[in-house]
Image (cartoon, rainbow, N blue to C red):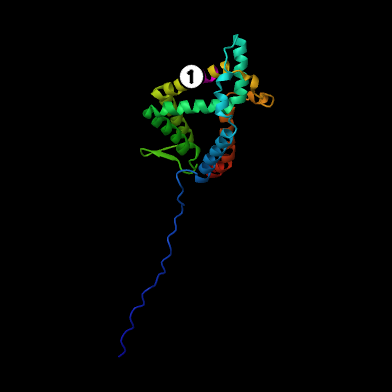
């Protein structure tokens, strides 16, 4: 009598598990990297155009202006020539003021980081989730605006920034009013004065934003 054959067990080939959603970084890394690179390049190119500091502090070129109109003319001409130097002085005063107030510096860095990581470079297919609640882009923008108002106007950040700007502008205008610009070559500098006092910083930020815009749009689509 033949023994019964053993049962045939079904063999299943395990299929590799695939995830339907690919994990994405919390921010659009290429766009953020392009933004930082263009900011640093623009600032580096701008600083390369600064005038010699010895020429800025030449004691023999200082004299008291005879009238307010002459002082205003000196400020305009000196700004056209020492624009990058003046902006560097204001930036150093701002940095020193923030470093002397660590709490204000931390609040300002937190505010800037919130705008960068929670709105500007956050992929659109990853909504913001806080405390178990999902926020849309419009709600996220509203929260960031409220947070900005609270940080700037209800903390020491606003007073520190305004005080530093007032000190920096006072130093710049005092130097521009007492520095005699007759020895400066201003022929090719006059058109640049019409772009505004913060044209250097504004141009750097706008160029960086324009360069990073395609990557940001691609990440948020």
Q: Residue furthest bottom?
A: 1
In the displayed structure, 208 sits above or below 70; it is: below
Going 45% across and 31% down the picture, which residue do you hit? 144
The reply, left or right, for residue 75 in relation to residue 118 is: right
Q: Is residue 171 magenta?
A: yes
Estimate the x, y position of residue 210 in percent, counting from the top left. Answer: 59, 37
- In the visual, does 1 lie left or right of 16? left
Crowding at mark 1 (Cα within 10 Å: few <14, some 14-19, many 20+): some
Location of residue 200 with respect to 215 vertically, above or below: above
Question: Which region of the structure is painted magenta?
Answer: 168-173
Badge 1 is on which residue?
A: 166
Residue 20 visible in rendering: yes
Q: Is residue 98 left or right of residue 85?
A: left
Q: Quadrant of residue 183?
A: top right
Picture coordinates of residue 137 (x, y %)? 48, 36
Measured as percent of width and height from the top left, residue 199 is found at: 59, 27
Give the residue drawn at x 58%, y 33%. Answer: 46
| Percent of width and height locating residue 17 | 42, 60
| Residue drawn at 53 percent across, 40 percent down | 35
Residue visible at 53% across and 20% down? 172
Q: Quadrant of the C terminus?
A: top right
Mark 1: which secondary structure?
helix
Residue 62, quarter of picture? top right
Outermost residue on the right side: it is 187
Query: Quick one: quadrant of the N terminus?
Result: bottom left
Q: Give 30 or 203, whichever is nearer the viewer.
A: 203
User: In front: 14, or 41?
Assistant: 41
| Residue 146 appears in the picture as rendered | no
Which residue is nearer to you in this view: 113 or 128? 113
Most extreme residue toward the top is 67
């Amino acid at each position: 009598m033949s023994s019964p054959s053993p049962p045939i067990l079904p063999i299943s080939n395990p299929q590799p598990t695939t995830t339907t959603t690919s994990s994405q970084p919390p921010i659009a890394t290429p766009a953020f990297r392009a933004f930082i690179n263009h900011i640093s390049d623009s600032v580096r190119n701008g600083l390369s155009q600064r005038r010699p500091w010895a020429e800025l502090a030449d004691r023999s070129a200082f004299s008291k202006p005879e009238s307010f109109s002459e002082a205003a003319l000196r400020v305009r001409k000196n700004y056209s020539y020492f624009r990058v130097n003046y902006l560097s002085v204001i930036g150093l005063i701002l940095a020193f003021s923030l470093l002397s107030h660590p709490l204000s510096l931390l609040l300002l860095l937190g505010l800037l980081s919130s705008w960068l990581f929670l709105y500007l470079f956050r992929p659109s297919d990853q909504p913001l989730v806080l405390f178990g609640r999902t926020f849309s882009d419009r709600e996220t923008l509203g929260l960031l605006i409220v947070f900005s108002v609270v940080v700037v106007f209800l903390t020491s950040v606003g007073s520190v920034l305004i005080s530093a700007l007032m000190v920096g502008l006072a130093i710049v205008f005092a130097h521009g009013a007492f520095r005699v610009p007759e020895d400066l070559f201003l022929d090719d500098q006059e058109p640049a004065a019409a772009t505004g006092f913060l044209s250097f910083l504004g141009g750097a930020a706008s160029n960086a934003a324009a360069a990073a815009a395609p990557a940001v749009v691609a990440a948020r689509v």
